[in-house]
Image (spheres, rainbow, N blue to C red):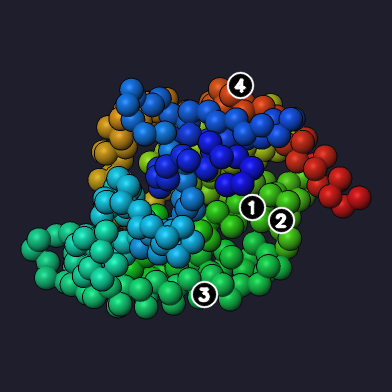
Amino acid sequence: RALYELGALMNHCCQPNTRHYFDEELNLVMIAAVDIPKEETISISYAQPLQATIQRRFTIKQAKCFECCCHRCSDPTEFRTYAGSIVCPQCSKSMVVAINPLDFRSDWRCEDKKCSYRETAQQYITRNEAFRAEIGQLSCGAGPDGYECLLGRFQSTSLLHPWNTNVLQVKYAITQLYGGGVPGGINLQDLSEKQLRRKVELCEDLLEVANQLEPGMSPFRSKLLQDLRDALEAMKSISGSSFNSAPAIVVQHPGVSWKTQKLNAREANARKNGTCKTTTSSPSTMKQQLEYVEQELSRIMACDPTLRKSSKDLYTGLTKNHN
């Protein structure tokens, strides 16, 4: 706020329509993350995209002294991702959502009007804090195996669906432990083909979420695209010529009906945010998968020159850090 007065005047939104970087002269450069309609407010975000509404709003209230009422916070389904929801413990089919997401004390209830399940805000918070505590108990050096084990426990419970924020946070941590250069992780060049496939699968899954929560050229989506590209390039070097015809790695969520509901809404949401490119037909081979990711990154790097151009930059950065 003291150094960049104009930047500090920008409004917050949990689905921001801009991103920024600092050039060589330390100028703050703002660029549009999506097409911004005339008279729409230009916004940035103070929040983490993988936090549920009640967490984001509490953090913003504590740190920035205001209560966010943006379109994501106002939507009980968080753009049909149900990121803050659990699967109904009573009917096991529909999601439990806040009756009024802009009220911290609001009760939560099953979306299915035929189901009578209801719980208080305190019950929701207590349960969610228990899941967050499990994540927090993992040490920085737990390694990918520790997080994979926790993810397995989360996925085995009937309450947490694949896009619940607790599940998503663990998935993202695993993508960074597999070749992301973080403590306790495995260097990209040391990953097995199985581990690389796992990284690709998780990045694709998280990208589906990013396309909904922070579409376009958002930092979150850009980082996932970089990680996905790095993993696919590593797989290409391992597989050789067979890479070109190998089937694309896709995300499978067997037996979950909520996925169909979300995907039905995705294209409409992408059109609204000017990101229809993310809803084109899926690549059928890994070669096409890599080409698509490279095209998306080229489009973003044309606007933000600070992004890494390839996984070689990651190795260079790691070497410099160790030296």
Q: Secondary structure at mark 3?
A: helix
Q: Disc 4 vs disc 1: Cβ atoms closer than 8 Å?
A: no
Q: Is residue 37 left or right of residue 183?
A: left
N-terminal-most mark, 2 or 4: 2
In the rendered image, which residue does mark 4 sit on?
302
Q: Is residue 50 visible?
A: yes
Q: Secondary structure at mark 4?
A: loop
Q: Residue furthest right?
A: 323
In the rendered image, which residue does mark 3 sit on?
134
In the rendered image, which residue does mark 2 sit on?
182
- Crowd class of label 2 (few under 14; some 14 to 19; many from 20; radius 10 Å): some
Foreground pick, 282 / 136: 136
Residue 280 location in percent, x, y?
39, 26
Q: Secondary structure at mark 1?
A: helix
Q: Disc 3 vs disc 2: Cβ atoms closer than 8 Å?
A: no
In the rendered image, which residue does mark 1 sit on?
176
N-terminal-most mark, 2 or 1: 1
Q: Is residue 225 visible?
A: no
Q: Is residue 180 left or right of residue 79?
A: right
N-terminal-most mark, 4 or 3: 3
- Crowd class of label 4 (few under 14; some 14 to 19; many from 20; radius 10 Å): few
N-terminal-most mark, 3 or 2: 3
Residue 140 location in percent, x, y?
68, 67
Q: Amino acid at mark 3?
A: Glu
Residue 11 location in percent, x, y?
42, 42
Q: Residue, x 56% and y 72% (percent of image)?
A: 136
Q: Disc 1 vs disc 3: Cβ atoms closer than 8 Å?
A: no
